[in-house]
Image (tube, rainbow, N blue to C red):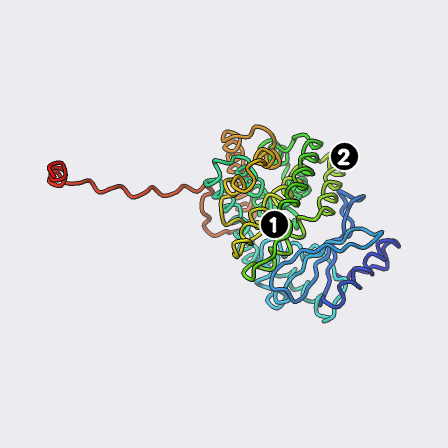
C-alpha cells in the first residue's frame, strides 16, 4: 500500500517531492490517489492527496506548484484513524482513503491502519451501516425538493445529488470504490452498467438533462463566476463561522479552480463523456451559487455549512441576486425546466432506488428499514375549532 514516487516519470516525481516539501511541517501522513493520473482526463489530471493532520474537519486546499500538475489536498483529521470502525462507515470517506496509497508516514503505522480499514470495509455489518448512510443522503436530497418547487432548477440539482447517493450505495454493495461519485458519477455508472448489464447511464442522462450545450454552459459559467466573485469576495469571517466553510469558500471561488474544472470538462466531453462534463460543471455552478448566501450569513455574524444550506436556496439567491436568477436556473438545469421535468426526474430516481435495493437484497446485504424517499410536505396548519351555535349568536348580537 506504499506509493513509490521514484518509479514515476521525472515531472511527476518532482511534483510529489515539491508537494511533500510544502506539506512537511503540517502533515502526519500523506496518501496519494492510485493511480496518480486520472485515466479519464490524463491531460488535465491533477494529483489528489489526502493529508492527515490536526484539523477537526475536512479542509480542501490547492497547491500551486509552478510548471507541474495541480495538486488537490484534502485534510483529514488524524482522530479518524484512531477509530477505524467508525471511519469504515463514514460514507464516501473510506472509499477515498482506500483508493489511495501511502506517500509519506511519520508514524510508521499508516500502512497497517489502511490494511485494517480495508478488512473492516468488507465486514457485512459495517457495509450495511455505510450503505444505509449513503441512502440517508439520497433521502435528504429528495426531501429538499419539497421546499424547492418554486425554483425547479434547484430541485433538479438536488436530484443530481440523489442519483449520486443511490449510485454510491449500489456501487458499494457491488464491491466497488467510488470516491468521486458526487462530482464525477459517470465512471462509476459505466462500471455498474458493465457488471449488471443495465443502462443506468442513459437513464440518468435523460432524467437530469445532461445532454445540454457544453459551450453555452462554459460561457455562462465564466460570466457567472466573474460576477459572483466580484460582488462577493471572501468575507471578513465572524468567529462563529466554521473553519471548513472558510476553506471551501476560498477553494471554490478561485479563478484557477474554475479554469481547471472547465479544462477537465472539455477533456471529458472530447472523450465522449458529455454527461460527465455537464454534471461536473453543474456541481461547481452550485458551489458558486452558495457564495452570496454564505457571505450574507457571515455578514450577519452567523455560521453556515458551505454546501448544505440552512435556508431555501432559490428564494435566498433571488433576494440577494435578483438579476442572476435566469443564469442560476440555466447553470443548474439547462433551459426551460419546470415542475414536470423535476417530477419526471424524481420518478426515474425512485425507479433507480427500487432497482438498487433489489440488487443489494439479492447480494445478501441486509439494510435496516429505510424511509420512503418523498419531497417534504409542510404539515397542515391546525384547523380552527368551530364555534358553538351559542358563541356565534352571541357574537352576532354583541
Question: Callout 2: helix, strand or loop?
Answer: helix
Q: CA distance from mark 2 to mark 1?
A: 29 Å
Image coordinates of residue 172 in percent, x first then y, are 61, 50
What is the residue that sits farthest to the bottom in this orientation?
Answer: 107
Residue 5 in view of the camera: yes
Callout 2–callout 1 Cβ contact below 8 Å: no
Mark 2 crowdedness (10 Å alpha carbons): few <14, some 14-19, many ≥20 = few
Upstream in sequence: badge 2 or badge 1? 1
388 in relation to 251, above or below: above
Mark 1 crowdedness (10 Å alpha carbons): few <14, some 14-19, many ≥20 = many
Image coordinates of residue 115 in percent, x first then y, are 68, 63
Question: Callout 1: helix, strand or loop?
Answer: helix
Residue behind mark 1: 172
Q: Residue at x 50, y 51 (%)?
A: 367
Q: Residue at x 68, y 57 (%)?
A: 74
Q: Kindly report which numbered mark, 2 or 1, lies closer to the viewer in this rendering.
A: 2
Q: Using residue 220 as the reference point, say whether residue 385 is left or right of it.
A: left
Residue 195 in view of the camera: no
Q: Using residue 286 as the reference point, say whether residue 107 is left or right of it.
A: right
Q: Which numbered circle lies on residue 270?
A: 2
Q: Which residue is more in the foreground, 152 or 392?
A: 392
Image coordinates of residue 327 in percent, x first then y, are 61, 34
Q: Classify the position of the C terminus by image quarter.
A: top left
Image coordinates of residue 88 in percent, x first then y, are 60, 59
Q: Which residue is more in the foreground, 333 or 96?
A: 333
Amino acid at each position: 500500500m506504499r506509493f513509490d514516487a521514484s518509479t514515476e516519470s521525472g515531472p511527476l516525481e518532482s511534483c510529489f517531492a515539491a508537494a511533500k516539501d510544502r506539506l512537511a511541517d503540517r502533515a502526519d501522513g500523506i496518501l496519494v490517489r492510485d493511480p496518480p493520473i486520472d485515466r479519464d482526463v490524463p491531460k488535465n489530471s491533477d494529483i489528489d492527496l489526502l493529508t492527515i493532520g490536526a484539523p477537526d474537519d475536512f479542509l480542501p486546499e490547492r497547491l500551486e506548484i509552478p510548471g507541474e500538475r495541480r495538486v488537490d489536498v484534502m485534510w483529514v483529521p488524524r482522530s479518524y484513524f484512531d477509530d477505524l470502525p467508525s471511519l469504515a462507515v463514514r460514507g464516501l470517506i473510506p472509499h477515498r482513503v482506500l483508493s489511495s496509497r501511502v506517500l509519506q508516514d511519520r508514524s510508521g503505522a499508516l500502512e497497517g491502519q489502511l490494511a485494517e480499514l480495508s478488512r473492516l470495509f468488507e465486514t457485512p455489518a459495517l457495509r450495511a451501516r455505510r450503505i444505509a448512510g449513503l441512502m440517508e443522503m439520497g433521502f435528504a436530497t429528495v426531501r429538499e425538493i419539497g421546499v424547492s418547487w418554486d425554483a425547479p432548477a434547484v430541485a433538479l440539482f438536488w436530484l443530481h445529488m440523489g442519483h449520486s447517493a443511490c449510485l454510491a450505495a449500489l456501487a458499494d454493495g457491488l464491491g466497488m470504490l467510488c470516491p468521486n461519485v458526487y462530482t464525477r458519477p459517470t465512471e462509476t455508472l459505466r462500471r455498474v452498467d458493465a457488471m449488471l448489464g443495465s443502462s443506468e447511464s442513459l437513464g440518468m442522462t435523460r432524467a437530469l438533462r445532461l445532454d445540454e450545450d457544453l459551450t453555452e454552459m462554459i460561457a455562462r459559467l465564466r460570466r457567472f463566476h466573474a460576477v459572483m466573485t466580484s460582488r462577493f469576495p471572501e468575507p471578513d469571517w465572524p468567529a462563529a463561522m466554521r473553519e471548513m466553510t472558510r476553506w471551501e469558500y476560498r477553494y471554490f471561488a478561485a479563478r484557477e479552480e474554475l479554469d481547471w474544472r472547465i479544462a477537465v470538462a472539455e477533456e471529458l466531453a472530447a472523450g465522449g463523456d458529455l454527461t460527465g462534463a455537464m454534471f461536473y460543471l453543474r456541481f461547481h455552478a452550485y458551489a458558486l451559487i452558495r457564495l452570496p448566501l454564505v457571505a450574507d450569513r457571515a455578514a450577519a455574524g452567523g455560521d453556515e455549512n458551505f454546501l448544505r444550506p440552512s435556508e431555501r436556496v432559490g428564494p435566498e439567491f433571488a433576494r440577494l441576486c435578483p438579476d442572476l436568477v435566469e443564469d442560476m436556473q440555466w447553470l443548474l438545469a439547462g433551459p426551460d425546466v419546470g415542475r414536470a421535468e423535476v417530477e419526471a426526474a424524481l420518478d426515474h430516481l425512485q425507479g433507480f432506488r427500487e432497482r438498487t435495493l433489489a440488487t443489494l437484497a439479492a447480494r445478501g446485504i441486509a439494510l435496516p428499514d429505510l424511509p420512503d424517499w418523498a419531497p417534504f410536505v409542510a404539515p397542515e396548519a391546525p384547523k380552527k375549532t368551530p364555534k358553538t351555535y351559542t358563541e356565534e349568536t352571541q357574537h352576532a348580537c354583541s
